[in-house]
Structure formats: structure tokens, C-alpha cells
């Protein structure tokens, strides 16, 4: 039994992240072990969740991992916790394009049998708030909206009008939050600025969010609502690839897999590292902004997503590491690069020299590329055999030219049919982010090549 709440909103921008993170920090400050979760593929919000709770922020993505893994992954992350708080994505009923409710916050709430707290931006309304909440509460009878938190309330008079209107809706008001600049988190071209780039300010912002929630929310009512969730019958997910797929064996050293981290490469799912270890690897993190060499004994390299465009000058200036990465790739060692990793392996990024592993150049763009992807492996690689199908996600404001190598990584069906990415020796580099919990054989295949 895990007490749990889903924090949702009618639309993006209502304050979900502020409220969810504030609740996590506030409950953790009261001595509860809080498990943080985020609906969808977002990498940035979980960083703030981890700061608030001291536990890894974990994603629940019904599109990339499948609906059957949502509850098991949730229970895996929440093991041993007193309470779980799940931050939604976009509006409550918004999901994957043209896929109905798939990957929506509403679907995840139903899969978790979790009560929903609706965060409403009340800044430009009074009595209309009751119609809005009534509509969301009645749209899907399987979604249980257990309460409302009113955000950006202007005055006591404004609060009175809102409470009076909602008194007839049957949905209780569990919190009222005033406008508070101290809780704001700065944004840029891909959303919030990650925790790793503003540690001290992020700590202060999370503390302010917790104070705001404590002052404006009925914490006992929220906790009681969370504890009203029924038991889940699913079994917790376990990071395993099967003994048959596990690399190494008795007396055989575990291959060292270096994983890029630091401020430039903050996008990763906790389950990837867990699966690499389950497949027999020794995982060592390094920072391409600071470290001039790969970890000793590196046999494979994973470079995930992040913001190399914000650190192009520093990444380029670290010539010893760029050469080390190029030499490792030239040796045929397995290298898996997603999005930011793809840019780092390119010949240049915005005119600055990168690792030069790929015969391609990258640059910033005005165009946002965003959305789920159905991907088919075009070429045999260290991640997948040709013909293998995975689901992934793209999210970037950069372009790379050419967009695919002589051997492409993936064939994509949406939003238009195209091939993209590079397979070159042991290198697999692509814009597409994947979640290996849905395809643990990916980790096993990669570590197997490392061994």
C-alpha cells in the first residue's frame, strides 16, 4: 500500500511543478519518505523533485514503456516510502497526439488508482472556476478529482469569491496560493533551467515552494486523500535482463561503462543505470566539462541528453577528452548517444569543434522539434538489431546536417516518414530519446558488446 497523489492542471502553466515540488519538499520536511514521479518523458522536473525529496525523480511514461509498466515502475520507485507524489504533464486529459488518452495524466492516474489534485490558475477568474472544475471532474468518471489547489490568487476578496463558487461544485478546496516571485524557476528554450546549472538558487526555490505550500495548503487533508488510494495489485518492476543476457560471469571483470553527467548532460532515466548494472556493467559517471580523460578501463560510453549548446565553448575547450572520446569510438567500442550526445559526437556545434566522431555539423535552430516517435532500427547496432521496434521521444531546438549517416539509426513514422541518426562501427547516435525499462534487451545488448 502506497499513499499517493497525482498533481494535475487544466493546462500547462498553471503551476503544477511549483505545487508538486512544494508538496514533496513539505512532506519530506515533516519526516515522511516521499517518492517523486513525473508523467511523461520530461527530464528537468524530476531534477527538482529529487532535490525536494532526496530520492531519484522517476518518470511514468505510458507511451514509451507501455501501460502495463506504469504501476510496476511506480511501485519500484516508491518502495519503502510513506507517500508518493506524481506530477502530471500538460493538461489533465492531454496525451500523445492522435492517440486518445494514451500517456495522459488522466490515464496514469487511472492506472495508479490515484486521487487527483487539480491545480487551477485562478488569476483571471472568479465564479467561472466552478464551471471549469466541474467540467474536469465530470469528463471521465474513472478519474477521481479529490480536491483543488487554487494558484495565483490575488487577494482575500478574490479567495472568498473562488471558495464561494466552488462550494457548490462538490470538489473541496485543499489549498490557496498567492502569487510569489520567490518560488519561480527560470525557463529558456526547452523549459526550466535544470537543477545542475543553478544548485544554490534551486535549493532556495524549492525551500520557498515548500514554505508556500505549508502556508497555503491543508496538509492533513492532502495526506488523508493520498491515504485513501486503494492497494495496487501489480508487482514492483525489477531491473533485470535475464541471466542469459547478462554479460560476464564468474571471475570475469565487469566492463566499465562511462556515463556522461554534469551540467551539460543532465537528461537521464534512473532505470538506465540500473539496467546497465543488471546487465553486468560497472557504471562510472564523468563530467565532460571538467574531466580530461574517460574513466579508467572504459569499455563503453553512454552520452545522454542535456544542453551542450549552453556549454559549447567549454566542451570544445576540453580537447583532451574530445580526443579520448574520438579514440574510443575509432576503436570500435560501443558508444550510445542521444540528442545532446549526438551533438557532442559531431564535427562541430555552432562552429565550435566537438569530438569529430561523426561527419556532421550541428547548430541551434529557431524550430522546436517535439513529440513521441515510433522508431524502427534501420541498421544493426550495439543497441538493437535491424528491424527492432522501439518508442521514443524528440525534444530539441538544434539541427544536424546531414540528418542521417550512410547507415541510419532509426526509421521514423511520425510526424513524417524519415530516417535519422548514425550507426558507425560501435557508435549509435540519434536525436531520439528512449526509455530502456520498456526494452531491457537494449541495455543487455549494449553491455554484451562492451564485454
Image (cartoon, rainbow, N blue to C red):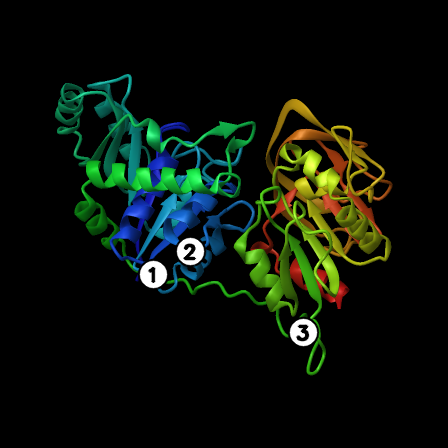
In the figure, residue 122 lies in which quadrant? top left
Closer to us: 164 or 44: 44
The residue singled out by tag 2 in the image is 55
User: Can residue 413 be spotted in the picture?
Assistant: no
Q: Residue at x 78, y 28 (%)?
A: 351
Label 3 secondary element: loop
Q: Nearer the viewer, mark 1 or mark 3?
A: 1
In-front residue for pair 189/121: 189
Label located before the other in sequence (1 or 2): 2
Q: Position of residue 270 (x, y in %)?
A: 53, 55
Q: Quadrant of residue 159?
A: top left
Q: Is residue 356 visible?
A: yes
Work out whether 336 lies above or below 397.
below
- The image's mark for residue 244 is 3
Q: Is residue 386 left or right of residue 11?
A: right
Q: Nearer the viewer, residue 285 or 78?
A: 285
- State the residue at coordinates (65%, 36%): 311
Of tags 3 and 2, the one toward the viewer is 2
**Camera-side residue of 348 and 17:** 348
The tag earlier along the polypeptide, 3 or 2, is: 2
- Which label was assigned to residue 382? none
Amino acid at each position: 500500500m502506497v499513499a499517493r497523489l497525482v498533481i494535475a492542471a487544466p493546462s500547462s502553466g498553471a503551476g503544477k511543478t511549483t505545487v508538486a515540488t512544494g508538496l514533496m519538499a513539505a512532506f519530506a520536511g515533516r519526516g515522511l519518505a516521499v517518492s517523486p514521479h513525473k508523467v511523461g518523458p520530461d527530464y528537468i522536473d524530476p531534477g527538482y523533485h529529487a532535490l525536494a525529496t532526496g530520492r531519484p525523480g522517476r518518470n511514468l511514461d505510458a507511451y514509451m514503456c507501455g501501460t502495463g509498466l506504469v504501476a510496476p515502475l511506480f511501485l519500484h520507485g516508491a518502495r519503502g516510502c510513506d507517500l508518493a507524489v506524481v506530477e502530471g504533464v500538460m493538461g489533465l486529459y492531454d496525451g500523445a497526439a492522435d492517440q486518445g488518452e494514451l500517456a495522459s495524466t488522466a490515464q496514469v492516474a487511472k492506472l495508479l488508482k490515484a486521487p487527483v489534485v487539480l491545480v487551477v490558475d485562478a488569476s483571471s477568474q472568479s465564479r467561472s472556476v466552478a464551471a471549469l472544475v466541474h467540467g474536469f471532474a465530470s469528463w471521465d468518471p474513472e478519474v477521481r478529482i479529490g480536491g483543488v489547489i487554487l494558484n495565483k490568487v490575488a487577494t482575500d476578496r478574490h479567495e472568498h469569491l473562488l471558495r464561494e463558487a466552488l462550494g457548490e461544485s462538490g470538489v473541496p478546496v485543499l489549498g490557496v496560493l498567492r502569487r510569489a516571485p520567490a518560488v519561480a524557476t527560470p525557463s529558456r528554450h526547452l523549459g526550466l533551467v535544470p537543477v545542475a546549472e543553478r544548485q544554490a538558487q534551486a535549493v532556495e526555490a524549492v525551500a520557498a515552494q515548500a514554505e508556500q505550500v505549508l502556508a497555503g495548503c491543508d496538509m492533513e487533508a492532502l495526506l488523508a486523500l493520498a491515504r485513501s488510494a486503494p492497494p495496487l495489485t501489480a508487482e514492483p518492476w525489477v531491473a533485470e535482463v535475464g541471466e542469459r543476457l547478462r554479460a560476464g560471469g564468474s571471475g570475469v571483470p565487469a566492463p566499465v561503462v562511462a556515463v556522461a553527467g554534469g551540467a551539460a548532460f543532465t537528461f537521464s532515466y534512473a532505470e538506465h543505470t540500473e539496467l546497465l548494472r543488471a546487465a553486468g556493467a560497472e557504471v562510472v559517471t564523468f563530467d565532460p566539462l571538467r574531466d580530461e580523460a574517460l574513466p579508467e578501463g572504459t569499455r563503453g560510453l553512454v552520452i545522454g541528453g542535456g544542453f551542450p549548446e549552453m556549454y559549447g565553448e567549454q566542451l570544445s575547450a576540453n580537447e583532451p577528452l574530445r580526443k579520448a572520446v574520438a579514440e574510443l569510438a575509432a576503436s570500435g567500442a560501443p558508444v550510445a548517444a542521444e540528442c545532446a550526445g549526438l551533438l557532442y559526437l559531431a564535427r562541430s556545434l555552432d562552429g565550435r569543434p566537438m569530438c569529430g566522431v561523426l561527419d556532421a555539423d550541428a547548430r541551434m535552430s529557431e524550430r522546436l522539434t517535439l513529440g513521441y516517435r515510433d522508431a524502427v532500427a534501420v541498421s544493426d547496432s550495439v543497441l538493437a538489431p535491424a528491424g527492432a521496434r522501439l518508442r521514443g521521444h524528440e525534444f530539441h531546438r538544434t539541427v544536424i546536417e546531414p540528418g542521417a549517416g550512410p547507415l541510419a539509426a532509426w526509421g521514423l513514422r511520425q510526424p513524417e516518414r524519415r530516417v535519422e541518426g548514425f550507426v558507425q562501427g560501435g557508435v549509435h547516435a540519434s536525436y531520439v530519446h528512449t526509455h530502456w525499462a520498456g526494452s531491457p534487451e537494449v541495455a543487455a545488448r549494449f553491455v554484451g558488446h562492451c564485454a
